[in-house]
């Protein structure tokens, strides 16, 4: 059963965030991530407004969680620290 990362991001320091953008793909490639939405136009209907919204598909919940907790993504998260406001949820598919 597929699982998805749903991420909402507002970047406060683009230069520092570039390091995250260099490191994060290493984890996504390792865990077979497939990007379904990445940025683009969006409209906030309820809740907090973020600049970017990302949906990433993984083969299953265990793989999605392993990617998040991986050494590769941990390095990316640390690089992103204090330069972006981020909310990430991991959701299992119903099919």
Image (tube, rainbow, N blue to C red):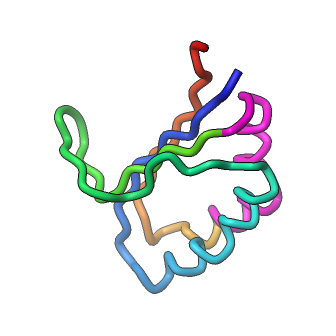
7 in the magenta segment: no
Quadrant of image for the C terminus: top right
Q: Residue 87 placed where, x, y %? A: 45, 45
Tell me which residue sits at (61%, 23%) in the image. 92
State the image quarter where residue 85 is shown.
Answer: bottom left
Foreground residue among 34 and 80 = 34
Q: Nearer the viewer, residue 80 or 43?
A: 43
Q: Is residue 60 magenta?
A: yes
The x, y position of residue 7, in whole percent, is 47, 46
Q: Quadrant of the N terminus?
A: top right
The residue sitting at 31% across, 58% down in the picture is: 40
Q: Is residue 42 placed above or below 19 in the rendered structure? A: above
Residue at 79% over, 31% down: 62
Residue 58: name its quadrant: top right
Q: Is residue 71 left or right of residue 91?
A: right
**Image point (57%, 13%), residue name:** 94
What is the magenta segment's predominant secondary structure? helix
Q: How far across and how far down the image is residue 5, in percent?
A: 56, 40
Count numbered badges in the picture: 0
Task: Out of 84 and 43, give the one closest to the viewer.
Answer: 43
User: Among all residues in the image, which is located at the extreme top?
Assistant: 94
Give the vertical position of 95 relative to 19 (above or below).
above
- Frontmost residue, 26 versus 86: 26
Residue extent of the magenta highlight: 58-77
Q: Is residue 68 left or right of residue 8?
A: right
């Amino acid at each position: 059963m597929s699982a998805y990362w749903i991420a909402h991001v507002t970047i406060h320091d683009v230069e520092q965030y570039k390091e995250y953008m260099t490191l994060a793909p290493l984890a996504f490639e390792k865990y077979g991530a497939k990007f379904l939405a990445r940025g683009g136009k969006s409209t906030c209907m309820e809740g907090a407004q973020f600049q970017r919204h990302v949906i990433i598909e993984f083969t299953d919940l265990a793989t999605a969680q392993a990617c998040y907790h991986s050494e590769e993504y941990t390095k990316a998260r640390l690089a992103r620290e204090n330069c972006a406001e981020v909310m990430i949820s991991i959701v299992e598919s119903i099919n």
